[in-house]
Amino acid sequence: MSNIKLNIAKAACFLEAGAVKAFEPKVKEAQKALEEGTCPGNDFLGWLHLPTEISNAFLDEIEATAKVLRENCEAIVVAGIGGSYLGARAVIEALSNSFGWLIQDKKSPVILFAGNNIGEDYLFELTEYLKGKKFGVINISKSGTTTETALTFRLLKKQCETQRGKEEAKKVIVAVTDAKRGAARTCADKEGYKSFIIPDNVGGRFSVLTPVGLLPIACAGFDVKQLVKGAQDMEKLCGKDVPFEENPAAQYAAVRNALYGKGKKIEIMVNYQPKLHFFSEWWKQLYGESEGKDKKGLFPASVDFTTDLHSMGQWIQDGERTIFETVISIEEPEKKLLFPNDEENLDGLNFLAGKRVDEVNKMAELGTRLAHVDGGVPNIHVSVPKLNEYYIGQLIYFFEMACGISGNLLGVNPFNQPGVEAYKKNMFALLDKPGYEAESKAIKERLAKEK
């Protein structure tokens, strides 16, 4: 089986000759620090060899739990935020029928996502949709007290128990949480829920290959063993002893840091397949939360082409030259659709008659890449043979490994997120949460002065 391929030629050409190669010693040192656990955040390196440490027995348990949920639920709500839902959603959306939520296949439950916002309309509409339906919940939270997820789970737990009865609800509520601590663990033990452990040494944005991602993906009916196999193979391809020029994660980390050093401050993730929208969202969190600290870091953005060529295309082509693109290209789509002939040819498109729609898409992609390079936008190209579990597994590990290396090259701790706490402190103070009395008083006095 072939592998995903990385081509940095149209990015390296914007740099001095040998600029990427010059990063080899730094990349080797960064990867060595990851392997030896000497880098900042070394207590969160459990993802590094996670793929090869996953056993078939563990995956069998994931699949068995998913089978229970699939057989007893019309809908399954995944309650989580950030890394506790983005990885699962990225994979599920990439592999699902684009209109599956309309088709509502009787063989598979609808997979819904909540606990990632505090929108009252969203939650009201979710609870209305679930009325009268046999639904289950996967509650994903290490602490059980993250506001968005905890609030949502309280609503869903009560509704599930009301609709299905407390005993039946216990069979279709699963906790993915800490092994010993936290409100979610206490609740799971008290209620007798089936539970899976989030490893202490794996942070949320690196957790898609733990039960955080694997259980929802299995519930959606996809092959988690193939997903893990892809990640395992990519782990080998990105190993510390693989030559620099042959290691895709090392090359990607090097070229993006070289471009950053030359004033390219924004990296735009580009896809030409609508199914990859949430993969870009997962990628944005992975890199934004890992590198955006100490007043450093590329700003990760994303676009869905060709759709966004009609909105962001002008800026990318002619705007400030502080950007570069990383393009994910799917070589072979799952389905085949030919463009029809039309006798009147009013739209002038008969020259496309008989061609696959994907051929048109590919030429749009190639034409755009050429135009953007000509317009001064470096392009990194990631080619994926097919959009399936195996290759998504490869993509996940490729980007994770490159992120770990890249964060070390940047000189930050890629595995913490201190900036995320700032909004929480303000929110709790404004809501008069017990224990925040001093903060509540201070923030209210500040707001009064600002009126």
Image (cartoon, rainbow, N blue to C red):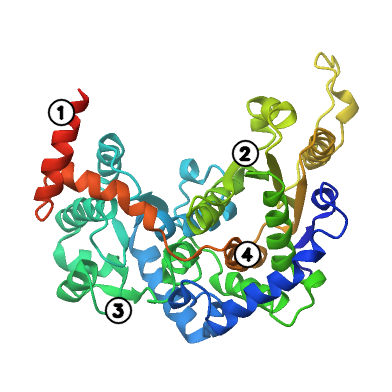
- Residue position marked by numbered label 4 in the rendering: 409
Q: Amino acid at mark 2?
A: Val
Taking 93 as reference, is 191 left or right?
left
Q: Earlier in the sequence, mark 4 or mark 3?
A: 3
- Residue position marked by numbered label 2 in the rendering: 303
Query: Real-space Cα distance between discs 1 and 2?
Result: 40 Å
Report which quarter residue 340 is drawn in.
Answer: top right
Taking 217 as reference, is 115 left or right?
left
Quick one: SS at disc 1?
A: helix
Quick one: SS at disc 4?
A: helix
Q: Are marks 3 and 1 in contact (CB under 8 Å)?
A: no
Q: Nearer the viewer, mark 3 or mark 1?
A: 1
Report which quarter residue 309 is drawn in.
Answer: top right
Above or below: residue 243 compared with residue 10: below
Q: Amino acid at mark 1?
A: Ala
Q: Position of residue 249 (x, y in %)?
A: 69, 66
Q: Nearer the viewer, residue 210 or 68?
A: 210
Q: Earlier in the sequence, mark 1 or mark 4?
A: 4
* Tag shown at residue 448: 1
- Confirm whether residue 226 shows in the render: yes
Taking 416 as reference, is 241 left or right?
right
Q: Position of residue 319 (x, y in %)?
A: 69, 28
- Residue position marked by numbered label 3 in the rendering: 179
Q: Amino acid at mark 3?
A: Ala
Pointer 3 local density, CA inside 10 Å: few below 14, some 14–19, many at least 20: some
Pointer 4 local density, CA inside 10 Å: few below 14, some 14–19, many at least 20: some
Query: Real-space Cα distance between discs 4 and 3?
Result: 33 Å
Q: Nearer the viewer, mark 1 or mark 2?
A: 1
